[in-house]
Image: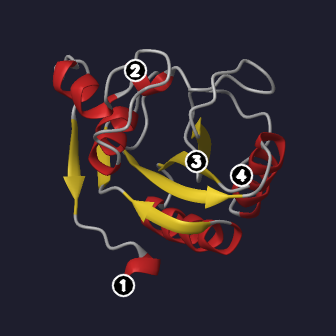
Amino acid sequence: MSVRIFISLGSNIEPERYIKAALSELSYHFSNLLCSSVFESESVGFDGSNFLNMVVAADTDLSIPEVIAVFKKIEQAHGRIPGAKKFSARSLDLDLLLYDELVTQDPIELPRAEILTNAFVLWPLAEIAPELLHPVAAQSYQSLWDDYDKSQQKLWTIPFTCPQMA
């Protein structure tokens, strides 16, 4: 049975290169990809180069552990160092935000908490799934973004064409 997943994608080391590579890999493993705009933002939690972030929706028949394994494989194939500290520069960061409407703590927390706290996750999610309801907050992502305190984080869209959509 196919489920709709939402993926947070970010990089601050050669970010355009790694985001394009990740999108290519994601299109190999998943179907019906839908890309948000790409957003540039300052690093959060450490001093570092600006990040590029986006959210990608996709369909999959894989279980949550299988999806996470695919993400880890893609990250490591593109220079992500396993066990690197949380707030640090990275070539590629892939996080599962939503797995359909599932709410769980095992094997990971879903929906991912950063949806509600990070503008670089919430804004692109609201862009591609504005009417979708957050399974815990029971509000649409557009409504959550409209109510978000935008003074917390600075981010802006940049020109970027998703390779699979070109």
Closest to the observer: 161 or 101? 101
Q: Position of residue 7 (x, y in %)?
A: 54, 47
Q: Is residue 26 above or below residue 93?
A: below
Task: Write the residue at 50% across / 65% down.
Answer: 33
Q: Position of residue 84 (x, y in %)?
A: 72, 34
Q: CA distance from mark 1 to mark 3?
A: 22 Å
Q: Secondary structure at mark 2?
A: helix
* Dot label at residue 5: 3
**Residue 155 percent location from the top left of the image:** 24, 39
- Foreground mark, 1 or 3, reads 3
Q: Quadrant of residue 47?
A: top left
SS type, badge 1: loop
Amino acid beneath label 3: Ile
Check disc 2 and report the residue beneath it: 116
Amino acid on which the number 2 mark rests in the picture = Leu
Q: Residues within 10 Å of mark 2 (few under 14, many from 20)?
A: some
Ranked by sequence position, the earlier of labels 2 and 4 is 4
Separation of disc 3 and disc 4 at Cα?
Answer: 12 Å
- Residue 30: x %, y % from top left: 65, 65
Q: Is residue 61 above or below residue 140?
A: below
Q: Which residue is mark 1?
A: 166
